[in-house]
Image (cartoon, coloured by chain):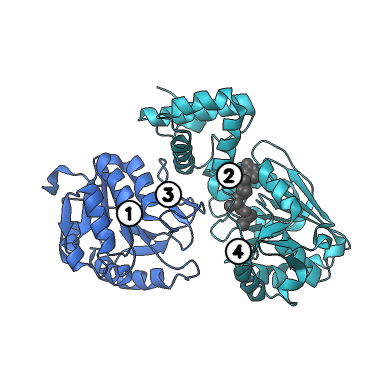
Chain colours: A blue, B cyan
């Protein structure tokens, strides 16, 4: 079923419980993963880049906090810095913004997903993981509207089911999967270009 | 179709993107405010935000309103200028200025500091307090500028909501503050009013970094969290303007997430603090 998608980028949104989920997901991606992965994980504005460094140590891919206006490269994992929104530009660079919080969050999953959907259209895969709020539901809706592939972690499989539930209700996503199945999907060589 | 160089990297694959380009052209031609090289993703989000507020269905409809009614244009400027700011935002930055910059600035008999894109002034008053504690305020001329007239007016008053004062007090202490923060203001139920003496040497003025020229020649420029709203080309242009406005040996302070990394200007500076984004201008 995924054959019809030719994915060029993956966006991931996670909140409460996301650290554990990402700690499992990121190391499982193959070193040859052909897409860029852009991640918003909700966190306190004061947090340092400990999480990013940990992911980088565990993952075969380069995991880094976004530098303002850096060019998006395939096979890299980009994490939104604390207290900034992350936006995708149509020239293939990344912008940061400190505009007001969206869904009480900065970075906000909606902001990343909506701007990414605008740029990648049908070539985007959006994934909503565990979380205790409703951020990401509108963003994932935008991904679907533009023809992208929408995936939500199964609420029963999520440490916090509220965010997956909100996304499922709003979007009727293409796939509702356990974390293991999401990893399997991403590892299929056919999905990503 | 061949596009002008500056437009080559833009995406005109949707009607919406074309409408957005036309809106920004129209605003520039009619009002002289140039948002054409702002971060497009950011501008698009904000324009959509205004569309919802004005109850219009397309960017073209919004353009009609903005062209024919200046009030709508002013609302657009407000929407596009993100004024989020704090006192002693990133305390480690202030600590680094205290340790690495002020000792050098102290060697000058007379100083000028320019806060470009100062928003409602929290950053400027934070600097004034720090300069006072380091015995520098009396011999410093501070320029505080922004292109949004509303926030400049607010900044001139030095009155802020009491809501955030706890957080500011913590920031002040972490930033290496030497006194009791409450000595610098009077508070009532809602507001904190900062000591008038702090602003004795501050000039508040409107200045647009994109369309106006060099503002003054100064010893230090603080331009934090402004460049992030520009695309790379515009960042380069504005960085050139900032470079011209600094004396040799002068300091440039950018926001924590900004850098000279992608700019031609990088080689014209020596890094003072890589993490806190403080740079020192080399010889011209
Ligand atoms: C996020 S605030 C930064 C405030 C403060 N420097 C800080 O870091 O807390 C960005 C400010 O840049 C101003 N700005 C945006 N474009 C500008 C321009 N072309 N010229 C001058 N100021 C501009 C906005 O009005 C806004 O007040």
Task: Report which residue position mark 1 lands on.
Answer: A136
> Where's residue A154, x and y in %?
18, 62
Residue B97: percent from the left, percent from the top?
Answer: 69, 68
Letter of the chain that mark 3 sits on in the rendering: A
> Residue under circle 4?
B163
Which is more toward the observer, B47 or A184? B47
Q: Which residue is mark 3?
A: A87
The CA span between labels 4 and 1 is: 29 Å
Q: Earlier in the sequence, mark 1 or mark 3?
A: 3
In the orientation shown, which residue stands out farthest toward the left? A1
Give the CA separation, mark 1 to mark 3: 14 Å
State left or right for residue A107 relative to residue B98: left
Give the Cα distance between marks 3 and 2. Answer: 16 Å
Question: What separation in Å lies between label 3 and label 4 (alpha carbons)?
Answer: 29 Å
Describe the element under mark 4 as helix, strand or loop.
helix
Residue B81: assigned label? 2
Sort mark 2 into few (<14), some (14-19) or many (20+) by Cα contacts within 10 Å. many
Q: Tell me residue A73's x, y (percent).
A: 36, 52
Dot 1 beta carbon under 8 Å from ligand 1: no
């Amino acid at each position: 079923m995924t054959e019809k998608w030719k994915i060029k980028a993956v966006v991931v949104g996670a909140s409460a419980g996301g650290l554990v989920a990402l700690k499992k997901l990121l190391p499982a991606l193959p070193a040859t993963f052909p897409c860029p992965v852009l991640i918003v994980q909700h966190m306190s504005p004061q947090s340092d880049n400990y999480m990013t460094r940990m992911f980088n140590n565990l993952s075969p891919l380069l995991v880094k906090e976004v530098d303002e206006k850096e060019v998006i490269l395939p096979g890299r994992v980009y994490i939104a810095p604390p207290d900034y929104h992350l936006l995708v530009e149509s020239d293939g660079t990344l912008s940061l913004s400190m505009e007001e919080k969206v869904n009480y969050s900065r970075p906000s999953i909606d902001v990343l997903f909506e701007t990414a959907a605008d740029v990648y259209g049908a070539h985007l895969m959006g994934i909503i993981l565990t979380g205790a709020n409703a951020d990401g539901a509108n963003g994932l809706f935008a991904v679907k509207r533009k023809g992208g592939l929408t995936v939500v972690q199964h609420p029963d499989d999520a440490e916090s089911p509220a965010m997956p539930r909100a996304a499922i209700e709003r979007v009727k996503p293409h796939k509702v999967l356990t974390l293991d199945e999401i990893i399997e999907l991403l590892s299929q060589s056919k999905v990503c270009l | 179709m061949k596009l002008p160089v500056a437009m080559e990297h833009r995406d005109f694959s949707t009607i919406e993107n074309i409408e957005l380009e036309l809106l920004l052209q129209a605003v520039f031609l009619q009002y002289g405010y140039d948002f054409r090289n702002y971060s497009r993703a950011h501008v698009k989000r904000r324009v959509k935000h205004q569309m919802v507020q004005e109850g219009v269905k397309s960017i073209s409809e919004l353009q009609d309103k903005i062209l024919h009614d200046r009030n709508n244009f002013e609302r657009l400027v407000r929407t596009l200028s993100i004024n989020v700011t704090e006192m002693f935002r990133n305390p480690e930055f202030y600590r680094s200025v205290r340790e690495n910059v002020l000792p050098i600035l102290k060697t000058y008999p007379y100083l000028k500091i320019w806060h470009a894109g100062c928003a409602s002034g929290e950053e400027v008053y934070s600097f004034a307090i720090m300069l006072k504690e380091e015995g520098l305020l009396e011999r410093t001329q501070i320029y505080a500028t922004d292109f949004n007239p509303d926030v400049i007016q607010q900044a001139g008053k030095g009155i802020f909501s009491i809501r955030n004062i706890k957080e500011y007090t913590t920031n002040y202490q972490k930033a290496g503050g030497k006194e009791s923060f409450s000595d610098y203001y009077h508070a009532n139920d809602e507001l904190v009013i900062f000591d008038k003496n702090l602003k004795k040497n501050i000039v508040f003025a409107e200045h647009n970094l994109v369309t106006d020229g060099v503002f003054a020649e100064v010893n230090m420029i603080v331009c934090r969290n402004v460049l992030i709203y520009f695309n790379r080309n515009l960042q380069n242009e504005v960085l050139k303007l900032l470079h011209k406005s600094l004396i040799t040996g002068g300091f440039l302070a950018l926001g924590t997430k900004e850098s000279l990394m992608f700019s031609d200007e990088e080689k014209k500076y020596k890094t003072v603090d890589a993490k806190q984004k403080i740079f020192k201008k080399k010889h011209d």
